[in-house]
Image (cartoon, grey):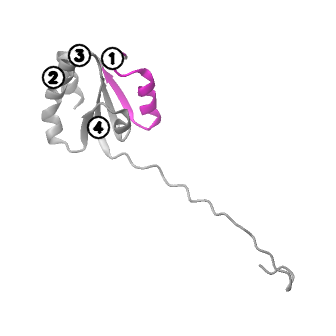
Amino acid sequence: MTLDGQAETTLALTVPDPELPPAPLNLRQFFLLGRGNVSQSALVQDQIRLLAPYLALHPDVAVGFDPTQAAKAERVAILGDMTLVNQGIEQDLHLAGCRVERMEGDLYALAAWLRVNL
């Protein structure tokens, strides 16, 4: 840059990267399962069996144990009580922009909840 017609100086300018919009949520719904003890693994298998027909019809719906994956969904249904998926994870999902619901109870309660909410 020439200042007075004779003297020159160089400026080091840093241009910040533009802020990118938040990534869109790429799943309509995620069923977040809790990791429990061995006796609860049978319950998780039965929960997945109840969800299977719904999952087969909706490619934008997923089920799993990973809260990071769940955070990519518009709506998250936590299947299990606070001992399986703690309050901190639920809060993180809210902060990620997810609508979060928790379903507690046995398989009959889950089946009834699925009929009402899906």
Task: Say the numbered circle drawn on residue 60.
Answer: none
What segment is highlighted magenta in the picture?
83-103
Q: Which residue is mark 4?
A: 29
Measuring from the top left, give residue 101's x and y in whole percent. 34, 26
Task: Tell me the tag on residue 38.
Answer: 3
**Callout 2 amino acid:** Asp
Q: Which mark is residue 81?
A: 1
Side of 9 where 14 appears, left or right: left
Quarter of image, res 45: top left
- Asked if 44 appears above or below 72 in the picture, the reply is above
**Residue at the image point whose x is 17% and y is 19% from the top:** 42
**Residues under labels 4 and 3: Cα distance?**
27 Å
Residue 93 falls in image quadrant: top left
At a point 27% along the width and 33% down the height, the residue shown is 64
Q: Nearer the viewer, mark 4 or mark 3?
A: 3
- Rounded to the nearest angstrom, the CA distance separating label 1 from label 4 is 19 Å
